Amino acid sequence: MAASARIFRAHLYFNSGRSEEGEAADLALALDTFRAVGDRWGVGNCLSGLAETNAMRGDLRKAVPLMKEAIALLKEVGAVETPFLRTRLAVTLSAAGDREAAEAALRETERLCGATGDPLGLAGV
């Protein structure tokens, strides 16, 4: 329960533009807890949040592997967040200068959304 509260508070800070108020610390603590109990959804969402935090702060080298790990875990549990996160990965790869990987990530997202009939995910591409 505490880990869930931390992840939600971190997202609240981040989404309200208050990104210097400890969201990274909350996410790191929640991540440790989710990993300890084996909650892949929780781990994936913490990694996603940490990736976004790093990307927004310009640390793209940290953001990309965190996003990739988050996508893999969230895919395992069938989470609906993966199309959005895959699109964010493409944006981050492009910002990091890897246009080819960014385009490949978008093509894969488009393929997956088409195969699963996800119009919202497809619209995000």
Image (spheres, rainbow, N blue to C red):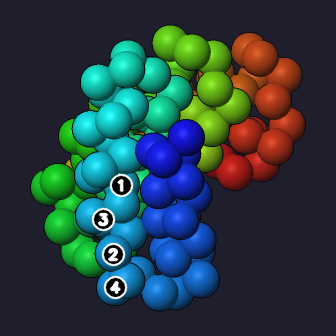
For disc 4, the marked residue is 20
Asked if labels 4 and 2 touch by Cβ distance under 8 angstroms, the answer is yes
Which kind of residue does numbered mark 3 sit on?
Ala
19, 67: nearer the viewer: 19
- Residue type, mark 4 in image: Glu
Q: Circle 3: is it few (<14), some (14-19), or many (20+) Cα within 10 Å?
A: many
Q: Are marks 2 and 3 in contact (CB under 8 Å)?
A: yes
Q: Please, what secondary structure does the residue beneath circle 2 have?
A: loop
Q: Amino acid at mark 2?
A: Gly
Query: Which residue is painted at 31% across and 27% down in the image?
Result: 35
Report how far apart the C-alphas of labels 4 and 3 lie in the structure. 9 Å
Structural distance between the alpha carbons of marks 1 and 2: 9 Å
Q: Are marks 3 and 1 in contact (CB under 8 Å)?
A: yes
Q: Is there CB contact under 8 Å for labels 1 and 2?
A: no
Q: Residues within 10 Å of mark 2 (few under 14, many from 20)?
A: some
Q: CA distance from mark 1 to mark 4?
A: 13 Å
Res. 27 mark: 1
Q: Residue at x 57, y 15 (%)?
A: 77
Residue that label 2 marks:
22
Q: Which amino acid, mark 1?
A: Leu
Which circle marks residue 24 in the picture?
A: 3
Q: Quadrant for residue 34, please give it.
A: top left
Name which of mark 1 and mark 2 comes first in the sequence: 2
- Secondary structure category for the residue under label 4: loop
